[in-house]
Image (spheres, rainbow, N blue to C red):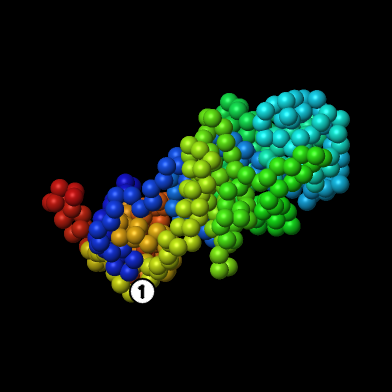
Amino acid sequence: MSAWRHILLFISVILLPLAAPAQIIDTDAEYAVIMDHESGEILWSKDADTPMVPASMTKMMTAYFVFDLIDQGEITLQDEMVVSADAWRRGGFPSGTSTMGLRPKERPTVEELLHGVIIMSGNDACIVLAEGIAGSEEAFARQMTDRAHELGLTTVNFVNSTGLEGEGHVVSAADLARLARRIINDYPQYYDWYSKSEYTWGQYTQANRNPLLGTMDGADGLKTGHLDESGYGLTGSAVRDGKRRIIVLNGTESKQARAQEAERLMRMAFTAFETRTIEADESRLAELDVWMGERRQVGVKLAESVDVTAHKRAFAKGKSEIVHDRLIEAPISAGDQIATLIVSIEGKDPIELPLVAAEDVPRLGFVGKAIEGLSRMLDGGA
């Protein structure tokens, strides 16, 4: 049956008829996400589900995949891996890209290489790990893409381990936020590496590029990225008063713009959002028509209370509607789900809440059915 929609003009508990600006959060970033770490809920987003070029934010998945292999006992932190001439040429000093400063035939450990990936953003460290684990970077990229899909990161398609230019190398901002949450939750024993201010290999020292570290209280990760194609991006996390938030942004025009926007979004992540409750009481939100019932209508109410977190000013622009089958057929028992309340709030995916029948509606008997059928015929089947 086709869906039938009733526009619900109020849910007074959370949606208030106040004037509000056209856009709650304005950002120059092409893609952006603010996530609550504990629940994994995306509190606000901009084009968050569109696959984009992540640049060096790719290295979050590279590190996660290596963490997996260590956890499974396939490799250890103390294993040594040989730096190939190719890894040196494409990711070392000759490449002119972010590097750990490795040289051909050196034998860094997995732990040292992970520090090179996470803190120094070393492309050479990524390639050495990829070759040492999978035999080639291409094979490693396929394996870590498959692992990302297993984690539910469906937009991931990685063709290399570094995030350097590669046709079809993409992931969405929302999936980067989900990946950051997995890193924090699944491998806390390694997470403090993301907050280290610098790392030295040999005579070469590279500072962590994350602009939030040292400038914002509680910031402790994760990864920056930049290519001409992608602009400047950042996946960041911070803790304040026991609450953690994760942000992702990509497509800013400069390092300075990235730093300023990251700080602004992270600050808003902690101060601009609040949680309100839609209470499941005895209030009847609507009366819906019933087919072949002893009553012609049935009331609907929320099945359970739900907390909704959003930007404080976004609640003023919230809308809601009831969606149900065009014909709701008796018999109906009180508590049966017969409709859905859809709440739309700027910057969030629509929230779908089950609506249940407020009372029983028995089916008509034989005579009643005949009368109902005749009535429908006379009404033109409406």
**Corner quadrant of residue 311:** bottom left
Residue 146 or 43: which is nearer the viewer?
A: 43
Q: Residue furthest front?
A: 203
> Which residue matches tag 1?
281
Mark 1 is surrounded, within 10 Å at the Cα level, by few (under 14), some (14 to 19) or many (20 or more) other residues, namely few
**Corner quadrant of residue 149:** top right
Q: Secondary structure at mark 1?
A: loop
Residue 293, given in percent of the width and then of the height, sits at: 27, 63
Using residue 293 as the reference point, say whether residue 251 is left or right of it. Answer: right
Q: Is residue 277 above or below residue 339?
A: below
Residue 342, given in percent of the width and then of the height, sits at: 36, 56
What residue appears at the point 44 percent right and 53 percent down from the top-left corner?
A: 44
Using residue 227 as the reference point, say whether residue 307 is left or right of it. Answer: left
Residue 300, given in percent of the width and then of the height, sits at: 31, 66
Looking at the image, how many numbered discs can be counted on the residues? 1
Kind of residue sitting beneath label 1? Asp
What residue appears at the point 51 percent right and 35 percent down from the top-left corner?
A: 231
Residue 91 or 304: which is nearer the viewer?
A: 91
Using residue 227 as the reference point, say whether residue 5 is left or right of it. Answer: left
What residue appears at the point 44 percent right and 49 percent down from the top-left corner?
A: 45
Q: Visible in this render: residue 132?
A: yes
